[in-house]
């Protein structure tokens, strides 16, 4: 059976280039499976999601949109929860999840990129939520988008359906780094390698704490930091790092 997702040591590829890597229920399920595989593999320190071919992901495919016309409320609810479950799995994943975006990331595809912890984009990449143009709402995506850009920028993107370039997306905080098209693959690999070289327990705990603090009152967030700080001190990564630092700091 042709798989719509390919996986190799933390590298996840959306593998429907003839369909611009459009999402359907089977692809979402395979993506969840690949994320679970990466979570269980202790050798994986960073997860990278990219698209095969010219585009990252164009959103829902035509068959999925046609099913919306026939589905009842229960079926539509189950379908929406499947995508929401994928976004939650990405946020809860112990490793950093990076989107490496070439070409277009539109609608659910832009949502998939936004759900990642870090977005790296080629200079010619395009981002947008054009759902409003067909009377639809990028509803689950807004949970991440609202946390990534300002309130007014978020509203402008989802209310107008405007498609923007990578540099503009970076200026507003939707994208973290933009690389020249011709150097994109090598720059992404270098970025991933630098992140993968960091102590894995520290990176994992940092991600977990950052999202856990979301919405907490200030005092509660500080207390969450106290607990994570204490746990971090007990890890071998931290102890080894302190020993290295102290050995370099010794005179002579």
Image (cartoon, rainbow, N blue to C red):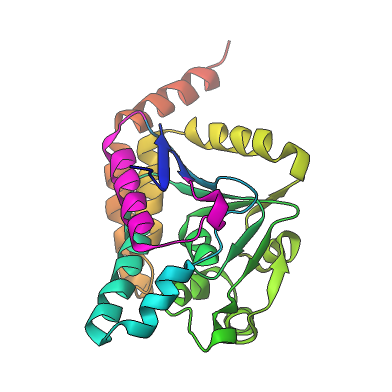
Q: What is the span of residues highlighted in magenta in the rendered image?
A: 14-43
Image: 129 above or below 175: below
Indicate whether residue 142 is drawn in magenta: no
Tell me what residue is drawn at x 42 percent, y 40 percent.
Answer: 6
Rendered-image quadrant of the N terminus: top left
Tell me what residue is drawn at x 56 percent, y 15 percent.
Answer: 251
Would residue 210 appear left or right of 122 to someone viewing this image? left
Would residue 106 appear left or right of 177 to someone viewing this image? left
Q: Nearer the viewer, residue 36 or 20?
A: 20
Tell me what residue is drawn at x 53 percent, y 47 percent.
Answer: 50
Rendered-image quadrant of the C terminus: top right
Residue 19 lies, in percent from the top left, at 54, 57
Where is residue 148, by image quadrant? bottom right
Residue 9 lies, in percent from the top left, at 40, 31
Residue 66 lies, in percent from the top left, at 42, 77
- Residue 134 seen: yes
Where is residue 52, by image quadrant? top right
């Amino acid at each position: 059976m042709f798989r719509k997702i390919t996986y190799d040591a933390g590298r996840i590829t959306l593998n429907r280039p003839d369909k611009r890597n459009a999402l359907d229920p089977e692809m979402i399920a395979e993506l969840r499976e690949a994320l679970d595989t990466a979570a269980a593999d202790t050798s994986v320190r960073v997860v990278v999601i990219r698209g095969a071919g010219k585009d990252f992901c164009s959103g829902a495919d035509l068959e999925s949109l046609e099913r919306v016309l026939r589905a009842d409320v229960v079926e539509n609810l189950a379908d929406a929860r499947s995508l929401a479950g994928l976004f939650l799995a990405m946020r809860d994943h112990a490793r950093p999840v990076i989107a490496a975006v070439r070409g277009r990331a539109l609608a659910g595809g832009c949502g998939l990129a936004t759900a990642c912890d870090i977005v790296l984009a080629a200079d010619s990449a395009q981002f947008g939520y054009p759902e409003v143009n067909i009377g639809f709402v990028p509803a689950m995506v807004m949970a991440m988008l609202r946390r990534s850009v300002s309130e007014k920028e978020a509203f402008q993107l989802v209310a107008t359906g405007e498609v923007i370039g990578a540099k503009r997306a970076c200026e507003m905080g939707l994208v973290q780094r933009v690389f020249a098209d011709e150097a994109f693959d090598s720059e992404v690999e270098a970025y991933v390698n630098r992140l993968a070289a960091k102590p894995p327990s520290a990176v994992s705990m940092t991600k977990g704490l950052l999202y856990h603090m979301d919405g907490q009152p200030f005092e509660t967030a500080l207390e969450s930091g106290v607990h994570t700080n204490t746990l971090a001190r007990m890890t071998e990564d931290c102890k080894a790092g302190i020993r290295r630092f102290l050995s370099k700091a010794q005179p002579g």
